[in-house]
Amino acid sequence: MKLTHQWLSILEGCILVALGLHILNSVGLLISGTAGIGMILLKLTSLSFGQLFFVLNLPFYILAWRALGKEFAFRTLAAVSILSLLSELFRHIVHLEVHPIAAAILGGMLVGFGLIILFRHNASLGGLNILAVYLERRFNIHASRTTLIADLCVLSVAVLVLDGWSLLYSLLAFLLLSSVVGRYHRPPKWAQNNETKHA
């Protein structure tokens, strides 16, 4: 039962992230980390986002295996594969017309909540997410800080491929993603206190 719950949660997290990324891709906006790098390369190559995301994550499985354990690495490989397949599927069956501001808000929040689900079930979407989890576990550096730094790096490169408004909307998506991960990555103190009282 526990195993079923875990994999259903990973699937649900991937669905949220895939939908968020699809919304952002539909209006040409970016998001952080490896996904953001994939979105930039999407504008420069003929490959699809799903293909780029899968290939970009390949080198990071070594870090996941050595630093975070083979179970984490396997769940991450599974999550990346699921997300890549869902991205390909959504590209063909989900067609959207969304204002860039709405896309930034919805996309950033959906990706953020999807990542939280994955983090809480000992999985990630590879790439810089692996680095964020590793730094938090090894050096107690909060995942939101690593995510924010990655956002700024991706945004700096994005200047080369996006116009001013798209950069601004992408920054909004970045900030919302970082805010969601920062607030929900660990249960807040008031929630922990309530859980203790009810226990």
Image (cartoon, rainbow, N blue to C red):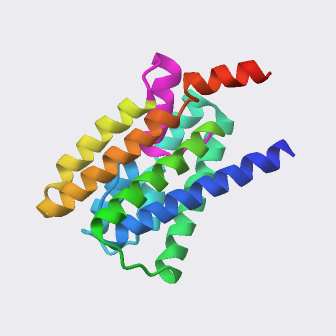
Closer to us: 127 or 133: 133
Q: Is residue 125 visible?
A: no
Please tell me whether residue 57 is drawn above or below residue 129 in the rendered image: below
> Between 192 and 81, which is closer to the camera in this rendering?
192
Q: Is residue 170 left or right of residue 56?
A: left
| Predominant SS of the magenta segment | helix
Taking 37 as reference, is 68 above or below it?
Answer: above
Identity of the residue drawn at 35% across and 59% down: 38
Pinpoint residue 97: horizontal percent, then vertical percent. 36, 79
Boundaries of the magenta span:
122-142
To which quarter of the image does residue 106 belong?
bottom left
Asked if residue 124 is among those painted magenta in the image, a careful observer would answer yes
Q: Residue at x 26, y 48 (%)?
A: 154
Can the viewer see residue 61? yes
Going by the image, does 198 lie left or right of 30? right
Relative placement, left or right, of 16 versus 151 is: right
9 on left or right of 145: right
